[in-house]
Amino acid sequence: MAAVGDTHEAQLVDDLTRTQLVQYAGASGDYNPLHTDEPFAKEITHYPTVFAHGMLTMGMTGQALTAWLGDDALRTFGVRFSAQVWPGDKLTARFTVEGEEEGALQIAVSVVNQDDREVLVGTATAAA
């Protein structure tokens, strides 16, 4: 069980693939071409390539949280997307239990890429 001061790190993905982006689009119903259509992403919107859905990164992070804390412990989870996630990225989640309030652990959440650039930041609460 986690306690105040504990930290945990989890690798979310070692090499994010375009296939994973397309699979997530199908599973979520989010077919925005920014995530799956390279000519659209490059020529129309002037991005260097397609990029991951923010909710894909959030979903992987939530899965890592529940793997660490247990399926029934997570109470709240909210994030802000701070940078794009690109095909080929390696993502690592970092969790820090910063406090406990009214029987709930207060957890800082961060996801960084292979360059240690933060791509997601947020908070979670879990049963103490």
Image (spheres, grey):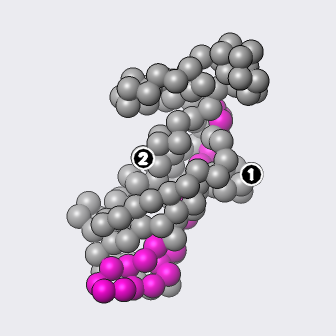
Relative depth, front residue between 95 and 10: 95
Q: Quadrant of residue 84?
A: top right
Name the residue type under label 1: Asp
C-alpha span from label 2 to label 1: 21 Å
The residue furthest left is 72
> Which numbered marker is on residue 106?
none
Q: Residue at x 56, y 20 (%)?
A: 33
> Is residue 9 at all visible to an observer of this figure?
no
Q: Earlier in the sequence, mark 2 or mark 1?
A: 2
Q: Residue at x 50, y 57 (%)?
A: 79
Q: Residue at x 47, y 78 (%)?
A: 97
> Which numbered marker is on residue 59?
2
92 magenta-colored = yes
Q: Quadrant of the N terminus?
A: bottom left
> Is residue 86 at all visible to an observer of this figure?
yes
Q: At which x and y percent is residue 86?
A: 65, 35
Q: How many marks?
A: 2
In the image, taking residue 32 as reference, residue 117 lies left or right, namely right
Q: At which x and y percent is residue 28?
A: 38, 31
SS at mark 1? loop
> What is the crowding at mark 1: few (fewer than 14 residues within 10 Å), some, or many (at least 20)?
few
* For discs 2 and 1, the disc positioned in front in the rendered view: 2
* Bounds of the magenta segment: 86-107
Q: Main secondary structure of the magenta part?
A: strand
Name the residue type under label 2: Gly
Q: Residue at x 64, y 52 (%)?
A: 82
Q: At which x and y percent is residue 29?
A: 38, 26
Disc 1: which residue: 115
Q: Is residue 45 above or below residue 125?
A: above
Q: Quadrant of the C terminus?
A: bottom left
Q: Is residue 51 above or below residue 70?
A: above
